[in-house]
Image (tube, helix red, strand yellow):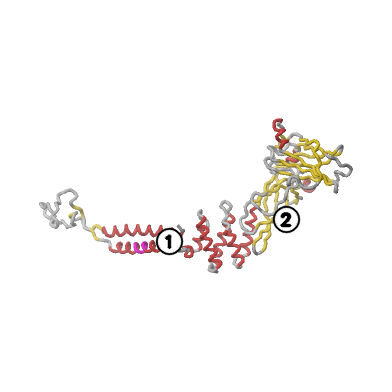
Amino acid sequence: MHSLESTITLWSAIAAGLSLLAIVIAWRGRLIDDHPLCRKCGFDLFGLPEASTNCPECGRDITRPRARRLGNRQPRKPLFWIGSFLLLIAASLLVMLAIGRVRHVNWNQYEPVSWLIRETAADDAATRDAAMNEIMARLTAGKLSDASLRELAHAALADQKDRSQPWFARWGAFIDTARAQGRFTREEWHQYCRQAADCVDFEIRPTIHKGHPIPFRLISRQSRGMPLGVLIAGDPTCEIDNLTLPISPQNDQDHFNWISPGSRCDFVAEQTEESIKKLADGEHEVTISLPIAFIDSHGSEEVAATVTRRIRQVSDDRPLVRPVADAKQQDIVRSNLSVVLLADRGTQSVTVYLASKGARYDIACAGSLRIGSSEFDLGLILLPAGRSRHISIPLAGALQFRDPSSADVVLEPSAEAAECSVDSKEFWGESIFFKNVRIARWDADPLTR
């Protein structure tokens, strides 16, 4: 049942019940004396000789128990007429509602804006949609006053801001239409964009060693607004105590451009000579910003999603992550990793592909490629536990003076690599060797074939 219909039905039923009670009380009347009366016919027995045993009116034996009652009563006429009038109104409303239900009357068109706003937060989806249909119909027909539109805009922005409740996405269509009509103020539009930028969150490693990179993770969540999309408009920036640090994605992972719930990307902010010199041990404030473009039917608006976190820097040599060595897990860890080598004879380069199916422990290592007596540094490599991941590392000039058919890949455990993870607490602490890995000719990415 619709909210307006149910509300009127409820109050009409209550009014009808109270009216009937008032009529009964009025009809019974008020007590005006204490004369004895015959309970059967109501004859006044006041002044009757004490020896009388029967009612002079109806002849009933008045000596029997409960044959008499006390007091004459006078009807309450004003209360009777008031009760009758209210009963008539309540009955009329109930009849009107019954006719409306038979004829499928749209009661939303008679509701004030404040009622419609309340119904957009109802648990019932049909009630929410019906209320928004009426709001959009009034907006499209130009039937909303400026005061009503401001009230609706305030409700839409409040709903967008409150992440404790699901976002009613049709508010976005309302805002889009109001803006097209020139009735959504610039201040309201900017607030809408700023609150929509809350679709990105950041995680950062809480403790780092002095001079080490600062790892952080960008996590996207459901956008609350913008029907056409939310686009990352550039690379994130990172400042620690107002000192800007250069940023790069970890390894070669893809950088997502469109905000979609659950997308994530890990970065490292490299410390500079200035930051190493100026930053003492202790807590520091890190500010991460990401430019975001919001796209709707009228164009785009760029704002920055900014988050501030506090981290602690330490200078001692105590490890922040713990290496794990378990002979029982050696074969399991090894089987979760795979290596492919692709050679491009044209550029005399080799690309190393490392893939992880999601081992139990983080694989944090310093990698190297050995071709004969030559060794090539693969840098620090991080493959997080529990997640499938692959990386590619190109080595230019590795085939400059040779044309080998195989090579060795060595992964040495590295605490420094593990500390480049946002949340790593332990990593695999034994070396992993891939002997005589065949070098294939370059034709396609074997991990995406």
Q: Is residue 64 above or below residue 4?
A: above
- Helix, strand, or loop for circle 1? helix
Left-right relation of 322 to 437 = left
Of the numbered discs in the image, which one, if any, rests on residue 101? 1
Q: Nearer the viewer, residue 330 or 175?
A: 330
**The magenta stretch spans which residues?**
87-91
Residue 441 or residue 431, whichever sits in front: 441
Q: Quadrant of residue 150?
A: bottom right
Figure quadrant of the N terminus: bottom left
Task: Categorize mark 1 by other alpha carbons within 10 Å: few (<14), some (14-19), many (20+).
Answer: some
Q: What amino acid is at disc 1? A: Arg
Residue found farthest to the top: 327
Q: Position of residue 40 (x, y in %)?
A: 18, 54
Question: What x and y, as percent, mark residue 34?
Answer: 20, 55
Residue 113 shows in the view: yes
| Kind of residue at badge 2 | Gly
- Principal SS element in the magenta part? helix
Q: Is residue 447 above or below residue 141?
A: above
Find the residue positioned furthest to the left. Answer: 51
In x, y percent, where is residue 191? Answer: 62, 59
Query: Can residue 278 be seen by looking at this rendering?
Result: no
In the image, 122: left or right of 96? right
Location of residue 159 (image quadrant): bottom right
Q: Position of residue 287 (x, y in %)?
A: 70, 51
Disc number placed over residue 71 in the picture, else none: none
Q: Mark 2 against mark 1, which lies toward the viewer?
A: 1
Q: Which residue in the structure is indicated by mark 2?
A: 234
